[in-house]
Image (cartoon, helix red, strand yellow):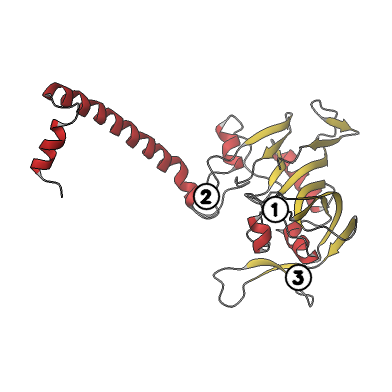
Amino acid sequence: KITPLSISGWMARTPFRSTLSLQRWTAGSEVLCRSVLLVLFFLLQHLAPALVPGASSPLASWTIRYEDPHVLVVDKGSGLLTVPGIGPEKADCMLSRLRDVGYPEVTHAPHRLDRDTSGLVVVGRTPAAHRALCCQFEAREVTKRYEALVLGWPDADEGEVDQPIGKVQLEGESHARMRILQGGKGRPSLTRWRVLDRSRLADGTRFARVTLLPVTGRAHQLRLHMRHAGWPLLGDELHGTDEAAAAFPRLCLHASSLSFKHPAAQRTGGTDCTDGVVTVSSGAPF
C-alpha cells in the first residue's frame, strides 16, 4: 500500500534525498517522457494504416528497375498496394509513392500485383504509353514469370493447371472471394509451372521452388491454381492451408521477369531491349 509515509521512506533511501537532486531527476524524467510521447505519436501516425486490413505497410519498400521517358518498371515490395484501395486509409500505394518522389505523371497502372506479392510492375509515363501497355496486357502480349515457394514436392518437374476462376460469395461470408469454379461458372484460366529445386525447411517440411507462367491473368490465379494442384504457396494466409500459411512470414510469390514491347518501339538503354522488346528481371527476396 502506498502512503505519504512510505513515499517519504523511499525518498530517504534513494539518491534523491536532497531537493536539488529530486529537481534534476524530475526535469530529466520530463524530457524522457516527452521524447517517448513523440516517438509513440510518430509510430501511431505512420504505422496505424498498417493495422487496417488490406492497407499498405509503411515499411514496404520499392525500387525502380528501369526508366526512360515513356515507361517505368518498378520492383514492388511485399505489403504495398499497387493502386489505391477504397477509403483514405488505403490511399498509400505504389502509384502515390511514385508521385511523391517526382513522377506526378504516373496516375494509372496497366496491371497490378496483389499487395502481398512482390516483384515487377510496368507503368506508362504518358497517356499514349499507358494505352499501349494496356492493349498489350489485354492481348496477352506481355510475358510474365513468377517465382514461388510451395509446400510439398510436386510429383513431376513441370506441368500446368487449367481450372476456371471466378468471384463468388458463399453463405455466411462477409464478402465475395476469388475461387476455382466448376460447371462453366468461372473464366478460363491457365497456369504453367516448372520445379527449380526441392528442399526442406529446418523442421524437415518439404517445399519446392517453382517458376510460374500465367497464360491468363485472373486475380489470385497462381495462388488458387497451386493450391488446387496440392502445393499451396508458403505464407499464403488467404488461399493456402494452415500449414503452408504458418511456414513463412510472408507470401512467397515474386514477379521475377517481365517482357513487353516498348510503347515507342525504339531501342532504349538500361536493360535488355531487342527489336523494341524490353525485358526486366528481379531476383526473389526469399
Residue 179 to residue 92: above or below = below
Q: CA distance from mark 1 to mark 3?
A: 38 Å
Q: CA distance from mark 3 to mark 2?
A: 29 Å
Q: Earlier in the sequence, mark 3 or mark 2?
A: 2
SS type, badge 1: loop
* Residue 47 appears anywhere in the view: yes
Which of the two discs, 1 and 3, sits closer to the camera? Answer: 1
- Give percent across and percent down for residue 236: 66, 57
Q: Which residue is under mark 1?
A: 203
Residue 169 to residue 272: above or below = below
Q: Earlier in the sequence, mark 1 or mark 2?
A: 2
- Residue 227, quarter of the rendered image: bottom right
- Residue 39, quarter of the rendered image: top left
For the residues labelled 1 and 2, say whether their Cβ atoms are less than 8 Å apart: no
SS type, badge 3: loop
Q: Which residue is under mark 2?
A: 90
SS type, badge 2: helix
The type of residue carrying mark 3 is Gly
Q: Which mark is residue 123?
A: none
**Around disc 2, counting alpha carbons within 10 Å, would you say few (fewer than 14), some (14 to 19), or many (20 or more)?**
many
For the residues labelled 1 and 3, say whether their Cβ atoms are less than 8 Å apart: no
Q: Which mark is residue 186?
A: 3
Which of the two discs, 1 and 2, sits closer to the camera? Answer: 1
- Give percent across and percent down for residue 265: 85, 34
Q: Earlier in the sequence, mark 1 or mark 3?
A: 3
**Around disc 1, counting alpha carbons within 10 Å, would you say few (fewer than 14), some (14 to 19), or many (20 or more)?**
few
Q: CA distance from mark 1 to mark 2?
A: 37 Å
Q: Residue furthest top?
A: 20
